[in-house]
Image: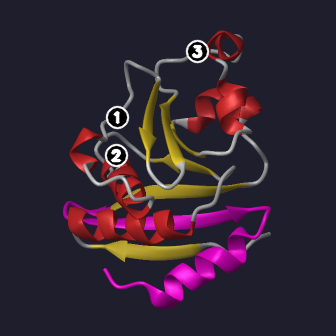
Amino acid sequence: MAKAITITCKNPGETFNLGVSLGKILVGGDVVTLQGELGAGKTCFTKGIAHGLGITNTNTVTSPSFTIINEYQGRLPLFHMDFYRLENEEVTSDLGLEEYLYGQGVTVIEWPERLAGIIPAGRLEVCFIFAAEDRREIVLIPHGKDWEERIAKIAENLVL
């Protein structure tokens, strides 16, 4: 099994900065899945990824709970998806999700377990755990590609 890395973030700023660090190393075709309870920091983290991808106005980055997919343009396109409201994989063909997942942009998915059958095997899984009211344990779990090496570099150079 791949080696996971756990990072403690003490506030939303640190969660954002971790996202920035990840965003800077993402390449076209990368898929990042986010798992955690409501309010765990998934959207804050995604705003950091957007900033790391060169999207300057991260205030426009919002949870796509009702739109399913939000698109942003940086050095690479960012496709932010939220599967919370989707009930089965049949809807994916109507939405064209495979085109995003296997395209040249970066895809970030909240609630990926709702449509687990379409999620690429090569991805970075990020789990958000409430460690305390003001603290999160963020676990980076590599799946395939060169994720293990890439997240090790993030951990080495991380300044929250």
Task: Say which label, 1 or 3, has the lower sequence index.
Answer: 1
Q: Say which residue label 3 marks.
A: 87
Residue 29, position in %: x, y? 69, 49
Who's the residue at 52% across and 27% down the image?
83
Task: Say which label, 2 or 1, has the lower sequence index.
Answer: 2
Magenta segment boundaries in residue numbering? 131-160
Residue 143, position in %: x, y? 74, 60
Colouring of the image: secondary structure
* Inter-mark Cα distance, 3 to 2: 21 Å
Q: Secondary structure at mark 1?
A: loop
Q: Say which residue label 2 marks.
A: 43
Q: Which mark is residue 84?
A: none
Residue 158 versus residue 6 in the image, above or below: below
Q: Secondary structure at mark 3?
A: loop
Residue 129, position in %: x, y? 41, 58
Nearer the observer: mark 1 or 3; the answer is 1
Q: Say which residue label 1 marks.
A: 63
Nearer the observer: mark 3 or 2; the answer is 2
Task: Say which label, 3 or 2, has the lower sequence index.
Answer: 2
* Inter-mark Cα distance, 2 to 1: 6 Å
22 or 5, nearer to the observer? 22
Who's the residue at 68% across and 45% down the image?
104
Who's the residue at 36% across and 52% down the image?
55
Q: Amino acid at mark 2?
A: Thr
Q: Amino acid at mark 3?
A: Glu
**The stretch drawn in magenta includes residue 52:** no
- Residues at badges 2 and 1 in contact (C-beta under 8 Å)? yes
For residue 91, side relative to residue 79 (left or right): right
Q: Amino acid at mark 1?
A: Ser
Determine crowd level at label 2: few under 14, some 14-19, many 20+ residues with C-alpha closer than 10 A.
many
Who's the residue at 65% across and 11% down the image?
91
Residue 121 versus residue 151 in the image, above or below: above
